Image: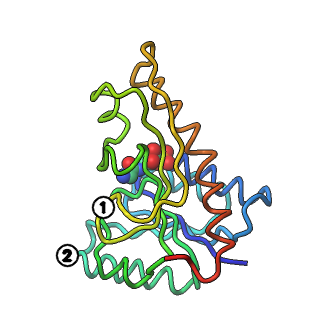
Amino acid sequence: MKKLAIFVSGSGTNMENIIKTVHAGKIPVEAALVVCDKPDAPAITKAQRLGVEVALVDRKKYTSKTDFEAEIIRRVEAKKIDLIALAGFMRVLSPEFVNHFKGRVINIHPSLLPAFPGAHGIRDAFEAKVKETGVTVHYVIAEVDAGPVILQRKVAILPEDTLATLEAKIHAVEYQLYPEALRVVSSINPPLM
Ligand code: GAR
C-alpha cells in the first residue's frame, strides 16, 4: 500500500477528513505522516488525535528555504513516503523540491484554476462577483497553483450567498473531491506526471 504524507499549515480540516477517510478504508493508502510548518497550527493536535505522526518543521528555525526543505525531504524519505498531498500548506515549494518528488505531489485549491490562484481563492472569486467558482485538485509543478488537473468541480455562487456560505459550500466539495482524487492518484503506478 502506498504511503501518504499530508502537508498542512493551518486548521487542517481537509487533512482530518482525508485521514478519517483513509482509516475508514475508503482510500487505499497508509496515512503515514503529517508535515506542518507552523508550531501553533490546529492541524497538529487533530493529526495526533487521529494517531498520525507529525513532523513539525518550523520555517522560522531555518535560515534558508533550502535548509527548511532539506529537513522536510529528510523526514519524508525517512518514512518512505510515496505520495504527498498538500492540504492548506501555505508555502511555495521550490522547483528543486518539486522536481525531487516529481509527479508525486498533489494540491487542493479552492477555485476553478487557472482562475483565482493564490492564498485567497474563495474570497477573490466572491469579490469578483462571478457566477461560479469551485475546487481543483492538481499535480504540483514549480509554478504556484498550476499543474495538470486531476479533478475539478464547480460550485455556483448564488445571489443570496455570503462569503461565509460560499466558504462552507467550497469546503463541503473539498471534503468529497480530495479523497476522490487520492483514490485516482493512488491507483496509478507510476504517476501520470
Ligand atoms: C483549503 O480551502 C484549501 O483549498 C486552501 O486552504 C484551505 C485549507 O483549509 N488551499 C489554498 O488556498 C492553496 N492555495 P484546511 O486547513 O481546513 O484544510
Q: 37 or 127, which lies in front?
A: 127
Mark found first going from the N terminus, 2 or 1: 2
Q: 116 or 40, which lies in front?
A: 116
Q: Is mark 2 within 8 Å of ligand 1?
A: no
How is the rendered protein coloured? Answer: rainbow
Alpha carbons under labels 2 and 1: distance apart = 22 Å
Q: Which amino acid does label 2 sit on?
A: Thr
Q: What residue type is labelled 1?
A: Val
Residue beneath label 1, please?
144
The structure residue drawn at horizontal position 19% and vertical position 75%, both measured from the top left corner, is: 63
Considering every residue shown, the one lying at the far left of the view is: 63
Q: Position of residue 179 (x, y in %)?
A: 64, 55
Q: Where is residue 164 in the image (x, y as percent from the top left)?
A: 43, 24
Q: Where is residue 159 in the image (x, y as percent from the top left)?
A: 42, 14
Mark 2 and mark 1 in contact? Answer it, CB < 8 Å: no
Q: Quadrant of the N terminus?
A: bottom right
Left/right of residue 93 with respect to residue 50 in the rendered view = left
As drawn, 168 above or below 51 = above
Q: Position of residue 187 (x, y in %)?
A: 69, 72
Whether residue 159 is visible: yes
Considering every residue shown, the one lying at the far top of the view is: 160
The structure residue drawn at horizontal position 50% and vertical position 52%, both measured from the top left corner, is: 43
Whether residue 11 is visible: no
Disc 2 packing (10 Å; few <14; some 14–19; many ≥20): few
The structure residue drawn at horizontal position 37% and vertical position 77%, both measured from the top left corner, is: 98
Considering every residue shown, the one lying at the far right of the view is: 25
The structure residue drawn at horizontal position 48% and vertical position 23%, both measured from the top left corner, is: 165
Residue beneath label 2, please?
63
As drawn, 28 above or below 192 = above
Q: Does the residue labelled 1 lie within 8 Å of ligand 1?
A: yes
User: Residue 142: which quarter of the image?
Assistant: bottom left
